[in-house]
Image (tube, helix red, strand yellow):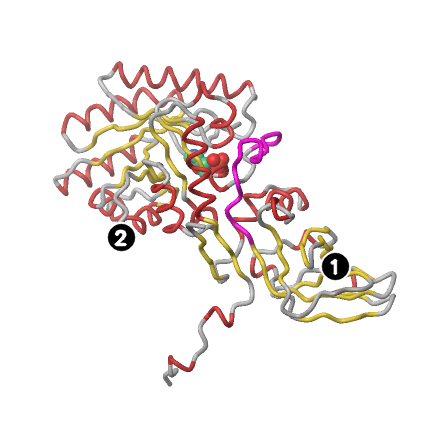
Amino acid sequence: MRLNAPTVPGSSELITGTVSVDLDAIEHNVRILRAHTTAPHFMAVVKGNAYGHGLLETARSAVAAGADWLGTAQLSEALTLRRDGITTPILAWLYLATSSGGAITDAVQHDIDVSLGSVAQLEVVAGTAHALGRTAFIHLELDSGLSRGGARREDWPALVAAARAAELTGAVSVRGVWTHLAWADVPAHPANTAAVADFEEAVQEAHDVGLTPTLRHVSSSANILARPEFHFDMVRAGLAMYGLSPAEHLDPADFSLRPALSVSAPVVLVKHVPAGTGVSYEHRAITHESRYLGLIPLGYADGIPKGISGSSIVMVGGHKVPVIGKVCMDQFMVDLGHQTGVKVGDTALLFGDPEVGAASADDWGAAINSHGDEIINRIAPRLQRVYTHGR
Ligand SMILES: *Cc1c(COP(=O)(O)O)cnc(C)c1O
């Protein structure tokens, strides 16, 4: 059976929650951060669907505002950027390097720089590039303590030696040397100073074997804001570019950074309930007095954390009202109080720009003992993204 397309309502009429992405805020934040660093190069990190903001739109805005590199974890996202015609240099640091080399073939053919942290990865990348008759541009990653990607300090000399040998064959060119700090989100931590000292030694060892990387890069958002001496040739901005706090005590507003993402939904039902009414599954909440409840058509399937129940965090009718009872899969209730002028169709703003009185994603993160990045990253892809630009 085929649906008769013209009679099917557009998705905007069907989907009840809206994720608004303020691309002006992204551009503004990129300009602020670029002005904040003396590093000549600026990477906009757009991994994870640009932290939930939408990969392509965010990447284009970041580039328009002056980002001259894009960074993804997954190579697949880097390829998506290329397929959309984005020609900005891209670094990807997460891919499977197997002997068949399939992913690397795509990277090399689409001029995507890849990160490397082992001789085994280097062999696959160099072998693949050689077979293609091309040069793979690589960034060597030092594991300076995160124990994630990268070569440990003791394995570094072998990696740079192998990289130099591969460079002499023409199969690879070492464009960058980089690390990601274990205490990246705690700028003042002494481990950062030690890790950066190790990094500088590692760069020296790369030079000693004849490598000439032009991009040394270490800092993500918190250190972009707080540790200028860690900026080197390029910084990699994620959270701060999205207007979120990258570290405790670093308030984006203090740097004039603005959140770009807001989530809202219409109130779909308003009802009066008497005192003593149990609300939602297992009646975890019971009204002490008669109340109006508002039904919000978003739930944990949309990324609303269950732990938000009880927090006064949803802006409806000009006030922040509490989430009452358990969050369900597609819906939750808010406590509108005794009397309410709230009507069906009024907007419930879950989080957004604090300037309009909304809670921030960071407030949501704090309310569930987490961080704003977990909130924005879990907002479901099924929600429609609406982009605003040029206001
Ligand atoms: C995610 C990530 C970043 C960006 O971190 P923020 O704290 O969001 O700025 C930078 N570099 C690497 C390697 C990352 O994985």
Q: Residue at x 58, y 43 (%)?
A: 372
Image disc number at residue 200? none
The amino acid at mark 2 is: Arg
Distance in Å between CA atoms under marks 1 and 2: 45 Å
Q: Which mark is residue 324?
A: 1
Q: Which residue extends farthest front?
A: 391
Q: Give left or right: position of 153 versus 245.
A: left
Comes first in the chain, label 1 or label 2: 2
- Furthest residue toward left: 133
Give the farthest residue toward the bottom: 1
Say whether marks 1 and 2 touch (CB < 8 Å). Answer: no
Label 1 Cα crowd, 10 Å radius (few <14 / some 14-19 / many 20+): many
Quadrant location of the N terminus in the rendered image:
bottom left
Q: Is residue 254 magenta?
A: yes
Asked if one can make out residue 280 in the rendered structure from this viewpoint, the answer is: no
Q: For the residue carrying disc 2, how many other residues have a C-alpha within 10 Å: few (<14), some (14-19), or many (20+)?
A: few
* Range of residues picked out in magenta: 247-262
**Can you say whether 110 is above or below 168 in the image?**
below
Main SS, magenta region, reads: loop
Q: What residue would you read off at disc 2? A: 83
Quarter of image, ligand 1: top left
| SS for callout 1 | strand
Q: Is residue 143 left or right of residue 210?
A: right
Identity, as a three-letter code, of the amino acid under mark 1: Ile
**Above or below — where is 332 with respect to 166?**
below
At which x and y percent is residue 209?
24, 16
Residue 290 drawn in magenta = no
Looking at the picture, does residue 294 appear above or below residue 322?
Answer: below
Q: For residue 387, what is the image quadrant?
A: bottom left
Q: Position of residue 27 (x, y in %)?
A: 42, 42
Q: Is residue 85 left or right of residue 349?
A: left
Of 105 and 227, which appears nearest the observer?
A: 227
